[in-house]
């Protein structure tokens, strides 16, 4: 599997709304650009601490992220498939800022949320870097993004078509890209988000949190009344769905995170992608739902700009 947890770019969704109203945007950027302001005053380790996946509950992690029995109650465990680390903004002045989440869909392309990068204000000399990190260690490499393509019918306030494909400068062949499900997830399905524990952000072991897909009515009711009220998503279960958990949550900096399942494919653990974290749905609270766009609803887009493989998950063997 291949995924990432990343930082933030704008300080709030209201700032993103201001940018939308002012028509400020860019077709440039890098695989990881989230909706929050840069955090130049923080050290890299502090940024990672803030933006990584929050594993919520009375869980204590050792240096190797060996969790207490509460992990089983919260459906959290170490990811079995290979996972990769993140996308960084590289300003001309030097340094780097981790900004968003994404997943490798073929050896040359990464998928993330269009919201992550569409409203990124670019400056001459800006670069974006995609850093890979393999669970278990021994593999740390970087790639630069050379091209970004947004889904043509992206509607931010409706949270539909929130996909972008990012082309890398050279291929990644040491890890397996995700496989994209050719079906939307069923209500009640238990799928996974990925990140690291705040107690140990430097670890190379990804923790996997389990969320349950909710009904369209539950999703709609959960979203109504949320600020900002400019958002009017329609949860149809085919293009947009939501999920929640009692213990795990997606936090700021993880827009674009893959929502997926680990399966056995040709005797290899692979990540099957069902959804990508959509705009205006990050609350870092396990009591709240988070929203996901369905990549298969934009199959033509993914097939036109990548060599992503689509699979029927019903013919695969889920990794328990």
Image: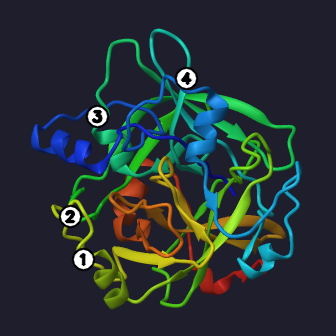
Name which of mark 4 and mark 2 comes first in the sequence. 4
Q: Secondary structure at mark 3?
A: loop
Pair 1/2: label in front: 1
In the rendered image of this protein, does residue 303 appear above or below residue 287?
above
Name which of mark 1 and mark 2 comes first in the sequence. 1
Label annotation for residue 27: 3
Q: Residue sitting at 34 percent across and 87 percent down?
A: 216
Horizontal side of residue 300 vs 107, given as left or right: left
Q: Residue tagged by mark 1?
A: 224
Pair 3/4: label in front: 4
The residues bearing labels 1 and 2 have C-alpha atoms spaced at a distance of 9 Å
Name which of mark 3 and mark 4 comes first in the sequence. 3
- The answer to which of 150 and 36 lies nearer the viewer is 36
Name which of mark 3 and mark 2 comes first in the sequence. 3
Image position, residue 211 (x, y; %): 58, 76
Q: Secondary structure at mark 2?
A: loop
Name which of mark 4 and mark 1 comes first in the sequence. 4
Q: Residue sitting at 10 percent across and 44 percent down?
A: 21
Q: Are marks 4 and 1 in contact (CB under 8 Å)?
A: no
The residues bearing labels 4 and 2 have C-alpha atoms spaced at a distance of 31 Å
Q: Secondary structure at mark 4?
A: loop
Q: Secondary structure at mark 1?
A: loop
Residue that lies at the very extreme toward the front in this rendered image: 58
Label annotation for residue 267: none
- The answer to which of 208 and 239 lies nearer the viewer is 208
Q: Residue tagged by mark 2?
A: 231
* One can see residue 199 in this view: yes
The residues bearing labels 3 and 2 have C-alpha atoms spaced at a distance of 22 Å
Count residues near mark 3 (Cα–Cα under 10 Å), then give few for <14, some for 14-19, many for 20+.
Answer: some
Q: Residue tagged by mark 4?
A: 96
Count residues near mark 1 (Cα–Cα under 10 Å), then give few for <14, some for 14-19, many for 20+.
Answer: few
């Amino acid at each position: 599997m291949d995924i990432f947890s990343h930082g933030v770019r704008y300080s709030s969704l209201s700032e993103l709304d201001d940018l939308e109203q002012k028509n400020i945007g860019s077709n440039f950027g890098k695989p990881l650009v989230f909706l929050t302001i840069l955090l130049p005053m923080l050290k890299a380790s502090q940024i990672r601490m803030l933006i990584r996946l929050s594993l919520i509950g009375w869980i204590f992690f050792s240096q190797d992220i060996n969790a207490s029995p509460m992990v089983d109650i919260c459906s959290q465990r170490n990811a079995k498939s290979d996972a990769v680390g993140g996308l960084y903004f590289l300003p001309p002045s030097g340094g780097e800022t981790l900004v968003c989440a994404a997943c490798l869909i073929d050896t040359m392309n990464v998928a993330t949320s269009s919201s992550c990068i569409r409203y990124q204000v670019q400056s001459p000399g800006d670069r974006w870097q995609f850093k890979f990190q393999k669970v278990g260690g021994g593999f740390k490499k970087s790639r630069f993004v050379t091209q970004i393509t947004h889904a043509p019918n992206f509607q931010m306030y409706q949270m539909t078509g929130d996909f972008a494909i990012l082309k890398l400068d050279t291929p990644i062949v040491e890890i397996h890209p995700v496989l994209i499900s050719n079906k939307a997830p069923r209500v009640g399905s238990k799928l996974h988000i990925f990140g690291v524990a705040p107690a140990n952000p430097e670890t190379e072991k990804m923790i996997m949190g389990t969320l349950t897909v909710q009904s369209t009515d539950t999703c709609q009711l959960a979203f109504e009344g949320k600020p900002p009220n400019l958002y009017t998503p329609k949860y149809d279960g085919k293009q947009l769905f939501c999920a929640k958990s009692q213990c795990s949550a997606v936090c700021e900096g993880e827009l674009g995170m893959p929502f997926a399942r680990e399966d056995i494919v040709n005797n290899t653990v692979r990540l099957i992608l069902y959804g990508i974290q959509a705009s205006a749905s990050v609350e870092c609270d396990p009591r709240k739902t988070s929203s996901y766009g369905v990549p298969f609803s934009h199959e033509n887009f993914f097939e036109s700009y990548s060599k992503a493989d689509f699979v029927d998950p019903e013919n695969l063997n889920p990794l328990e």
